[in-house]
Image (spheres, rainbow, N blue to C red):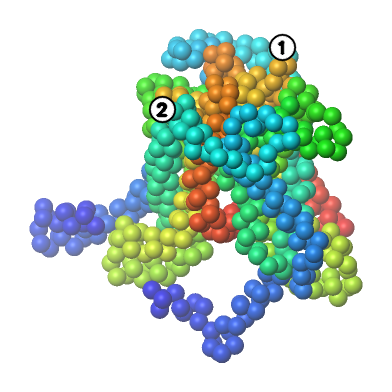
Amino acid sequence: MTLTASAPPASPKQAAPPRPGAVRRAWQKFSPYAYIAPFFTLFAAFGLFPLIYTAFVSLYRVELQTPGDMQWRGLDNYTALLSDDYFWLSLRNTFTIGVLSTVPQLVMALGLAHLLNYKLRGRTFLRTAMLLPYATSVAAATLVFAQLFGHDFGLVNYVLGLVGIGPVDWQTGTVASQVAVSTIVIWRWTGYNALIYLAGMQSIPSELYEAAEVDGASRWRQFFHVTLPGLRPTIVFTVVVSTIGATQLFGEPLLFEGSISGGISHQYQTLGLYMYEQGWGFFHLGRAAAVAWVMFLLIVVLVGLNALIARRRSRKEAVR
Amino acid sequence: MTALAGPPTAPPEPGTRPELPRRSRARRSRAGRTMQGGKLAYAILIVAVLVSAFPFYWTIVAASRSNADMARVPPSLLPGPNLMRNFEAVLEEADIGKALLNSLIVSGSITLGTVLCCTLAGFAFAKLRFRGRGALLAVTVGTMMIPPQLGVIPLFMLIAELQWVNQLQAVILPGLVSAFGVFFMRQYLVQSLPDELIEAARVDGASTARIFWSIVVPVARPGMAVLGLLTFMAAWNDFFWPIVALSSSEPTVQVALRQLGGGYVHDQSVIMAGTLLGTLPVLLVFGLLGRQIVGGIMQGAVKG
């Protein structure tokens, strides 16, 4: 508007109308870019550039104290990773903790969503209360759970003691520590996923249920033959999101005992934590970048695998 | 505006049409039709609520006792008298006061900036025509799933180059990038802003900027509020990048909590007092606006 208003004075009276029109048309053509510019400027500088540049950095030796000084090392960072036992251990831990946390979380979320979909009193309260853990930070949740899982005075071991189970070493035991870390993840995300599933369930047309009822399908069969197929896209979505979350798990293992190595013998160190240890524990930013790139490839492979399975299953369904 | 929004949905027979959506919505919300929640359903859900809430209760219990209480063998399950003393201790030892202020500045700026950037870009993607729109939107959506954690190393090098390490803008500026937000606002505007409204304003001679401020923003306000809430919580709780970019001399709440859990403080009840202080603001937001947050997450799920 200001452009069209300031343009006329320079031109004679008769020529005035076409000029603003032309300026206006040009402005209309380009002004949309002004609306996306703030986002894309920030996105390019702080989103896209770091992601791409990570691959580049991973080929150099870069020290934390002198990040401007880069020395070409080729694939050395990667070969160093592959020959580090702790890398392989953290890869395995990421996988086992990922399974331990994702599978129970999604199964319970599905069950809770099914119950929340009933006609209930205090629905809003129930939904909100279940989302409460999602509102807590990783740091706060982990500090509380670390306390609850304490070896000598933790509440969990006390309750287990009441039913005759001896004190579990939630810190140094490999399986126990991974279960404890997974518990934090499960606690924080189950309610969130339940709400996502609930939203998916509510968008399933009720005619499908009516038809199933006419056919004499029990509630149980309705769940398996109407609800689950209807939820497929939602389930794929939550599996993908949880997989990505599990691959980069970081705060929980870091704060569980406050150690950067993920336990005395790295028993619950994840790839995210391993990356942090390389970069900010050992000051090797180049090697940390190599870990980041490995994590990225891992995510691409896992998400691709997911998509493949989902597509094959739906094709099988279509054939039937 | 109401007159313009009216025609597309105006019913031919005013008596019958308005009831239809209401009836179908009622049926849909039951989804499984007459399925009343039985006693078992309530029991399981109440257990789930208790499990969700217990760690919060336990934080209050632990924060209001003493370190000696925490090491007693039948643990005490009721709050004690030491809450204020532990608050004082943690304010002194971990500088939680400064951390709270910093977190407020960081999360507030990120929320305002993100909502503005995303509404502008979301509007352009939803309602304006320009070359490269499809490709740019594809890039945005495509990177939505890539965790920003994978870019922290170059990001850190960039921040170090700019000499921003340990300054709040190092956390604020990267926090403004929200591909999800752009997508969310685009979907919101595609659904709730009729094209007729914009065309009518154009015919009346309004510029795009005018249209944005006096038509788009009022229509988008509920969506902006939900995006703002989700952004604020995410920014407040963000962990990885702040602990890399900031230090204990200029902490956000999460940086201070990391320091608390890092073994400098041994008094368990003081640690829990810090955790409680750091969580209270989000709980407050959640308590006041929890219903909207639930709605936002469920909406986002259907659209995404």
- The spot of residue A283 in percent (x, y) is 54, 13
- The spot of residue A42 in percent (x, y) is 42, 38
Name which residue type carries label 1. Ser
Tag 1 residue: A83
| Element at label 2 | loop
In space, the residues marked 1 and 2 are separated at their CA atoms by: 38 Å
**Which residue is at the front of the view, B260 or B255?**
B260
For residue B87, which numbered disc appears in the image? none
**The N terminus of chain B is located in which quarter?**
bottom left
Residue at the (87%, 63%) spot, across then down: A221
For residue B250, which numbered disc appears in the image? 2
User: In the image, which is nearer the foreground, mark 1 or mark 2?
Assistant: 2
Give the residue furthest to the front.
B81
Q: Is residue A35 left or right of residue A63?
A: left
- The spot of residue B94 in percent (x, y) is 47, 28
**Which residue is at the front of the view, A23 or B87?**
B87
**Total of numbered circles in the picture?**
2
- The part of the image, by quadrant, that contains residue A83 is top right
Name which residue type carries label 2. Glu
In the picture shown, does residue A206 fall above or below A63? Answer: below
Q: Is residue A114 left or right of residue A63?
A: right
**Which residue is at the front of the view, A252 or B180?**
A252
